[in-house]
Image: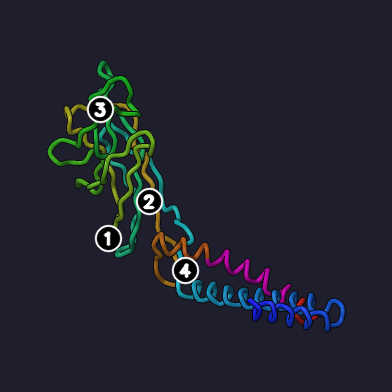
Amino acid sequence: MAHLRGCASAKNLYIWTMEEGEFERRERDLRLHYWFRFSVVGLTCAFLLLVGVSTVMGRSLVWEGSVYSSGVEVIGPVLTSGTQYVIVAKNTWWYQYIPYNLAADAMYYTTDPLNTINWSNYFPAPGGHSFLQIDNGDVDWGAFSNEDTGHTYTIGWTGNGAPVSFRIRDWNDSSYENNVCHIDVYIYVDVTVGGRIADWGEQVVTYFAVTGLIFACATALPVSKKIRG
C-alpha cells in the first residue's frame, strides 16, 4: 500500500510540475491520436471490402404481361441464348367462378369458396402439373405463396434465343368457359457490377462497408487536421 501511495504521489508531483494546462493538452492529443488510428483502420477495412465484393445493383425489367385464364397462349420477348433471367408470376385466377368461386394461382388451387385471396387450404395442381406453363411445359414454381406474399412465385430461366411463351392450363375441370382473371408475369435480368452476381450476404457486407467508409472519412479527416493544428 505504501508503494502504491508513493506511485500516486510521484504522479501527482509530475502533474504539478507541468506548465498549467500541459497535462490536459497531452491527454487530449493522445485521445485524438487513437481516434485517428481507429479511423484509418476502419477506412482500410471498408476499402478492402468494397474491392473484394461485387454487388447486384438491381434488376432490369425486360417484359411484363398478363396471362389470362382463357387458355390463350401469350408470346413474350426473345430471350438471349444462354442469358440468365428471373421470371416472377403473381396473383390468382378463378378456375370455377360461377357458382363455386374457386381460385388458383401459378402452382396451387383452393377448394375454399369464402376467400379467393387468403386461402384456408391449398393443393398442388393435379398430376404434378403447373397451372402456369412456360413454352407449353410445366414449371416448378416452388413453395406455396398465400395472401401475405401476394401469391408470388419466382424462378430462374435460361434464354434459348427464341420468344418465351406463357399459358394457363386448367387441370381441374379442363373447362375455360367459367374461368376468370389472369396471372401477371414479369421477366427481369440481373444487372451486375464487377462481372458477377453477389449473394444477399455479400450485399449486406457491402452496405456496411459503404457505411464504414463514409464514417471513417468523416472522422479521419477532421481528426487529422486537429492533430496537425
Which callout, 3 or 4, points at the residue further toward the start of the chain?
3
Which callout, 1 or 2, points at the residue further toward the start of the chain?
1
Find the distance from the CA under tag 2 to the CA under tag 3: 25 Å
Write down the quadrant of residue 73 in the picture.
Answer: top left
Mark 4: amino acid: Val
Which callout, 2 or 4, points at the residue further toward the start of the chain?
2
Helix, strand or loop at mark 1: loop
The residue located at (33%, 48%) in the rendering is: 154
Mark 2: amino acid: Ile
Q: Position of residue 21 (x, y in %)?
A: 84, 76
Q: Residue beneath label 4, please?
A: 193
Q: Give the number of the mark in front: 2 or 4.
A: 4
Find the distance from the CA under tag 2 to the CA under tag 4: 20 Å
Q: Residue beneath label 2, please?
A: 187
Write down the quadrant of residue 89 in the picture.
Answer: top left
Q: Is residue 143 above or below residue 109?
A: below
Q: Give the number of the mark in front: 4 or 1.
A: 4
Q: Give the number of the mark in front: 3 or 4.
A: 4
Q: Residue beneath label 3, please?
A: 95
Helix, strand or loop at mark 2: strand
Q: Is residue 71 above or below residue 140?
A: above
Q: Residue furthest right?
A: 20
Which callout, 4 or 1, points at the residue further toward the start of the chain?
1
Instruction: Answer whether residue 220 is magenta in the image.
Output: yes
Which callout, 1 or 3, points at the residue further toward the start of the chain?
3
| Residue extent of the magenta highlight | 209-224
Q: Is residue 214 above or below residue 95?
A: below
Label 1 Cα neighbours within 10 Å, binned few <14 / some 14-19 / many ≥20: some
Q: Position of residue 100 (x, y in %)?
A: 25, 18
Q: Is residue 136 above or below residue 9?
A: above
Helix, strand or loop at mark 4: loop
**Which of the image's four quarters has the C terminus?**
bottom right
